[in-house]
Structures are given as structure tokens and as C-alpha cells.
Amino acid sequence: MLAGVRSSKGAQLAVGLAIGVCFGFCLQKGAVTRYDVIIGQLLLRDFTVVKVMLSAVVTGMLAVHLLRALRLVELHPKPGSLGSSALGGLIFGVGFALLGYCPGTVAGAVGSGHLDALFGGVTGIMLGSGFFAAAYPTLDRSVLSKGYFGELTFPQALKLNPWVLVLPAAAVLAALLAMIEHAGL
Amino acid sequence: MHWLMMARWSPYVAGTGIGLLACAAFLFLDRPLGCSMAFARTSGMIEKLLRGPKVLQKAFYRKFPPAVDWEWMLVVGIVVGAFISSALSGQLKATWVPERWAQAFGPSAIVRVGAALLGGIFVGFGARWAGGCTSGHGISGTLQLAVSSWIAVLCFFAGGIATAMLIFRLAHS
């Protein structure tokens, strides 16, 4: 069944849509489709975004590695380099603070009726992507390959069994959430 | 069905749901889930509409064709899911200017949309530069313990926190 879904374009689109509807539902119920909540996180006054993200990462990390141990899924880490991941991350961060949404939450904000997300956010993200496509050949030849390390995970880099890092990482992230909650943030 | 109509869930419940959905993308689609590429593909589709098929010759669009794929449907789904969720809890309401924004920068919709547009340009440009966004790197990548994603997400928040602190300080001075 899995092979069938993975190889059929129509099934992929249907599964993508279904996951998206549930994702949008969770984002809105988590209140992270609101500018006030996201900017509150970046101003360090409201820790909802960190709570949602870290509980997603802990859950997903355990579930994906469990399914991987059962040979049901494979990992697909994105390739990276210092020039790409770090510099691109900082540029994204500047926009994240000005816009107050990211590409997933901006779509959720549009669905919740936030017109600044539709007319400013969605338009801007498409424009920025278009500018990048125009600059891509130049950037690809220069900064994007600086400090290239490829499709690397921490267990591969440290030559460790993934569980040696997965379990402590999940525990540390869960402890971080407990500390945030204990501090009343 | 009371929980479907609640205004808000605990962030841990919402986050656990999102983690399981990220896992479902690995299981059913054999891909990590991400949102930003759909915007780049749409941008290419619009550019193709305006400037013709020569757009497809651009190196970026040869690598990432401007066409509907499952991630594009995922983003459509997010709009629909958030719409259903906000409608069920009676929160669905057309707004132009968020509260915290208005307190700091005033009630003008034009100023807010202008800032959102500028921010969006940085978000779109930066997401492609970094090869992903808060979902592709921030959730799907970090849960794989990918080095690129941990660097990217730390930089998303470093850049975001510094910029937010700066612009809100400027607004209050």
C-alpha cells in the first residue's frame, strides 16, 4: 500500500492535501497562525511558538526513528553549507520578524481571515522566491557552496547509532519545555 | 466534538499533532514536509504566465519545476484547515492590522501591509537561500537531527529575535 501511495501522483496530491488540512487545523488551534503570538515569541514575551515547535520535534523525532528502525521510512536530511544554512537562516529571520508569519503559518493566517498575511505576506514570499530564482546561478557559484557539508546528520557526523543521540536529544528538549513551563513563560 | 470547537488547544497538544503529521509525510510520501517551496513554484508559474515558457530555462526552475506537487497541495490544505478551525470556534474574522502591531506602529493597514510585503520578500528569499523554512528545516529537518536544519533554525530565531527587538525598540523611542 505504501509503495502504491508513494508512486501515484494523484495519491500524493490527495495525501498532501489531507496532511495540509490537519496541519492547518493544528496550527490554528495552537494559535501560531496569529501575528501577535509569533511576534510575542520573537520578543521573548510569549513562548507558544517554542512550545508548539519543540513538542512537534520531540514527537516527530521519536516516531520517525521508530518507523525507521522498523524499516518503514528513510531519512532525507537536506544538504547544507555554512553559506547557505547560516546566512540564509539569518535573512529568513529578518523577514520572519517584519512579517510576523512564516510560510506555513502565513497560509494558516490567510485561512483565518488575516488580510495582511494574504496581501503582504503571500505576495512578498512569492516575490522573494522569484528574486532568488533570478539570483540563483550567481549565488550557487559563490556563497551557497561555502563551507559545504552536504546531507549530513549529527549521528553520521559523530559515527554514532542514531538512538544514542535521539533519546538524549528528545529528553533535553522535553526538559527545556518543562523549564519554560516552570518559569511561567 | 467539543474539542474541535475550542478556541485554542494546549500548545503541547497542537505540537504533538504537528509532529505526527510530519511523521505521516515520511511514511506515506517518503518525503519530509515543508511549506516554502510551494511559494517558489507558484512564483514560477505566475512568471511563466507573464513572460512565457522561456522562464522554464532558468537554472532554478530547471531544478525545481514550477508545477503543482504534493507540497503545493499541503499549503492549500493549511489554508482550508485553518479556515475550518477558526470558523468552528467562531474566530473567523477579516482583519488587516494585528493588535501588537497596532500598539507599536499604529493602526494604518497600508503601513502594515507594506511591512508584511517587505518581510515576505526576505522570508521568500531567505527560505530559498537556506533551502527550507520553519517547517522544512524547523520541524522535519531538526527531527532527523540534520546538521543543516539545526544551523538554519537557530539562525531563523537569532535573526528574528534581533530584528523584532530592534524594530519594537525603535517604535517605542
Image (tube, coloured by chain):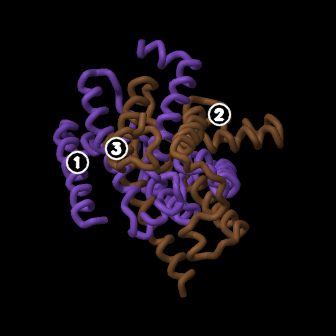
Chain colours: A purple, B brown
Whole-number angstrom distance, CA of label 2 to CA of label 1: 36 Å
Q: Residue at x 28, y 44 (%)?
A: A58
Please state, as top left, top right, bottom left or bottom right, where the N terminus of chain B lies in the image. top left
Closest to the observer, B134 or A36: A36
Q: Position of residue A153 (x, y in %)?
A: 31, 42
Residue A22: mark in rendering? none
Q: Look at the numbered discs 2 and 3 and tell me whether their residues touch, using CB distance below 8 Å.
A: no
Q: Which residue is mark 1?
A: A169
Q: Residue at x 57, y 56 (%)?
A: B123
| Amino acid type, mark 2 | Pro
The chain that hosts pointer 1 is A
Q: Position of residue B5 (x, y in %)?
A: 47, 41
Q: Which residue is mark 3?
A: B13
Are there few (<14), some (14-19), or many (20+) residues within 10 Å of tag 3?
some
Whole-number angstrom distance, CA of label 3 to CA of label 1: 20 Å
| Amino acid type, mark 3 | Val
Q: Look at the numbered discs 2 and 1 and tell me whether their residues touch, using CB distance below 8 Å.
A: no
Q: Position of residue A151 (x, y in %)?
A: 39, 40
| Amino acid type, mark 1 | Ala
